[in-house]
Image (cartoon, grey):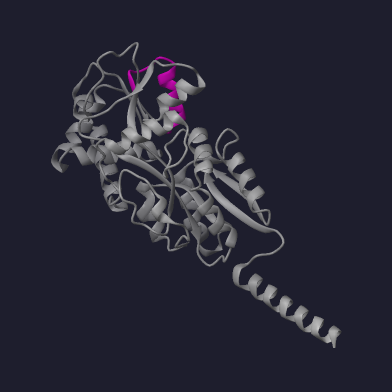
Amino acid sequence: MIKGFFMSKLKTFLFLTALFISDYGLSAVQPLHIYAEEYFAADWGPAPEVKAQFERAYPQCQVTIQSFDSRTTMLNRLRLEGKNTKADIVLGMDNHQLEAAEKTGLFAPAKVDFSRLSLPVEWKNTTFVPYEFSKYAFIYDKSKLTNPPESLKELVEREDLKVIYQDPRTSSIGRGLLVWMNKIYPPEQVEKAWQQLQKHTLTVGKGWSETYGTFLKGEGDLVLSNNTSPIYHLLTDQKENYAATEFSEGETLQIDFAGKIAGKHNICADEFLAFLLKPEIQNIIITKGVMLPVVEGDLEPHYAALKNAVMQGKTIDTLSVSAEQIKHWIEVWQRALSK
């Protein structure tokens, strides 16, 4: 009788275990494949430490990260692969790709507590999870430029300033300026504004690394970047001479987000997305990636102070910008530069 009772309990346990595995895709070791943009995935980026801490907290989850040289390349690969993609999570898209990512139809709603988010604008999307943000800004050397522009219009009009920025076709930061210009200038004035800026643009580079490197070599007065860049120089290089512009019109945002692929039934994906919002993990992400946290918490003081200033400052909300608008604005930019 005891043996029969034991066997009955064992069968029930095995059935429930099989049901759990069937429903959630959980096994002794559950692979979690992540597509990530290179700044997150790099050896010096957040990925190694975030991966190590996640696997320590969830030993049943085994993370592999595939790096892409740009966000555009990553999203194009995802479109090409479709439902056959190897990815469980795609990480490193930004708010200017929000509509394009949704239109793939490949993402499922995230199971995270969105009420924890603390951003300068309201994040209404429940599919994608923001994990870092910053404002776009022009970085300058205070010891060389003592009268920086106080508005985007002043930057455009002042021909004594040598400006460096990124190509909006290949750079997410370049797209940030594209959106910014089109939010400040009326449609009929944007092309002329680009032409004015072109008169004193030193270079338009493919990506951030090469353009910022050019600036650090002493070329140009201002370079388009994130408003967090001076913190990097302060904490890493112990240099206090770099500053970010603060424009009277306000600035646009870069909000980086992640999403899980639908139909995978990978419980590790839900856990990972929620993991990104833990304050201790946010500290890793922001200090390694040099961005701002999307939640409140006990954060590194310099980043916490800048976030407080950003939350109180003027922000231009661009979350409603469509892919079609960006395409049109790029055409206007190309036309202006070709004249």
Please say whether residue 212 is visible from this viewpoint: yes
Q: Is residue 36 above or below residue 43?
A: below
x, y percent for residue 3: 86, 84
x, y percent for residue 139: 35, 24
x, y percent for residue 180: 26, 38
Q: Is residue 78 above or below residue 253?
A: below
What is the quadrant of the C terminus in the image?
top left
Q: Nearer the viewer, residue 271 or 260?
A: 271
Residue, far front: 2
- The quadrant in which residue 85 appears is bottom right
Residue at 42% across / 32% down in the picture?
Answer: 303
Residue, far bottom: 1
Horizontal side, residue 176 vs residue 59: left or right: left
x, y percent for residue 253: 33, 40
Horizontal side, residue 210 vs residue 317: left or right: right
What is the quadrant of the N terminus in the image?
bottom right
Q: Which residues are magenta?
A: 206-222
Q: Is residue 298 above or below residue 237?
A: below
Please say whether residue 167 is visible from this viewpoint: no
- The quadrant in which residue 336 appears is top left
210 part of magenta stretch = yes
Residue at 57% across / 41% down in the picture?
Answer: 47
288 part of magenta stretch = no
Q: Nearer the viewer, residue 328 or 161?
A: 161
Q: Is residue 241 above or below residue 338?
A: above
Q: Nearer the viewer, residue 41 or 21?
A: 21
Residue at 45% across / 27% down in the picture?
Answer: 210
Horizontal side, residue 220 vs residue 10: left or right: left
